[in-house]
Amino acid sequence: MKLSLLDQVQIGTGRDSATAIADTIALSRHLDVLGFARHWIVEHHAVPYEACVDPMVLAPALAAATSRIRIGIGGVLLNNYSPYKVAESVQTLAALYPGRFDLGMGQSESGPLPDLALQPDRSRALLHDQGDKVHELLGHLFADLPVDHAFASLKVMPDVAPVLPWIMAVSPNSAARAGMLGLPLALSAFHKPEFAVESAASYRRAFQASGRKGLPQSPEVFLAIRLSTGVDQDEAERLAMPMRWCFDQRRRLETMPDRLPTVDEAVALAGGVWPAETAEWPMYTICPLKDLRDRLLTMTQAIGCDEIMLQDVLPDPAMRLAHYTAIAQALAD
């Protein structure tokens, strides 16, 4: 099983944005040594305890610090940007570090105010359907826009092999769009984990190989989950509390914490340690290390993939290094 990381570049206890970025670079080096397949970094706006508002800028620093692991812009919120400008940026990355970058394309909303601030024209209603922009971006990357397209004469480094584009999806409908485009699928089981199996099936049913050089000729998918693990179930549940408390504040109460709490602080704020969910597809996968292999294999086999991308919200960089070392060792034994 291949392991990857989806990184929010969280600002840990006693850290600031600059040290959080340095911590992520150190973590990327560590993941490279551990044999992780990918290190993707998110684009999140107006999150006080995260330091990754522009993954396009941070990505080359991670590539420079590592030698093998694929670095992912995971992802660019294409609804906020010009596809032409995104193509220029990622093709520059591809020229700097050939064959090292993935481009995850998403359309998440960051909130009314940051979404508005990101728009060049604030006089229009915000549009979150990225369909046309995906087609245009692919046309720029692969230099194959239709001859009658308004931007067909614009070429973006056509002599550079493009980054590998992925569609980030949650629902069966968005997964099917990835399949129809012949793109690999980054399947999130974060927000609607109950959709994961059907979304993967929808993607496979819809898949049509595109014929574009470098894109898969058959369905390619990885599964992304939030994971907390430890020496026993009690430790796994306790270490999950900063992640669970923060997301509970954001999703249920629509309140953004001003900083990332320590484990002890999160437990106190939550009124105790919340037990792990019992659903077959939980929002947070929480289990002891001894059960980790079987738990992840069950999930990847249900999806039909051999790669799983993990996410944590641990508040201390040393804890994160230890967490992923333990996971790699548990799956190697």
Image (tube, rainbow, N blue to C red):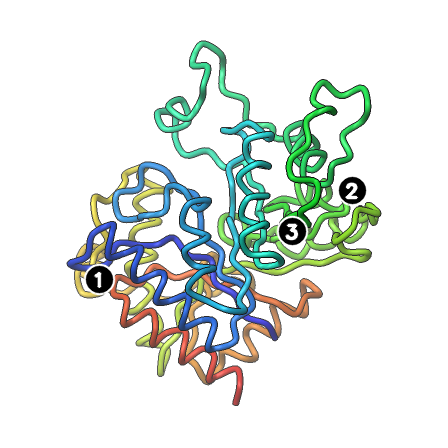
- The x, y position of residue 292, in whole percent, is 49, 78
Q: Which residue occupies the foreground of this view, 141 or 199?
A: 141
Closer to the N terminus: mark 3 or mark 1? 3
Q: Is residue 172 above or below residue 84?
A: below
SS state under label 1: helix
Residue at the spot of label 2: 180
Mark 3 vs mark 2, CA separation in Å: 16 Å
Q: Nearer the viewer, mark 3 or mark 2?
A: 3
SS state under label 2: helix
| Amino acid carrying mark 2 in the image | Met
Q: Nearer the viewer, mark 2 or mark 1?
A: 2
Q: Which residue occupies the foreground of this view, 157 or 285?
A: 157
Mark 2 vs mark 1, CA separation in Å: 45 Å
Closer to the N terminus: mark 3 or mark 2? 3
- The x, y position of residue 224, in whole percent, is 54, 58
* Residue 263 location, quadrant: bottom left
Residue 164, disc: 3
Left or right: residue 250 versus residue 191 is left
Residue at the spot of label 1: 267
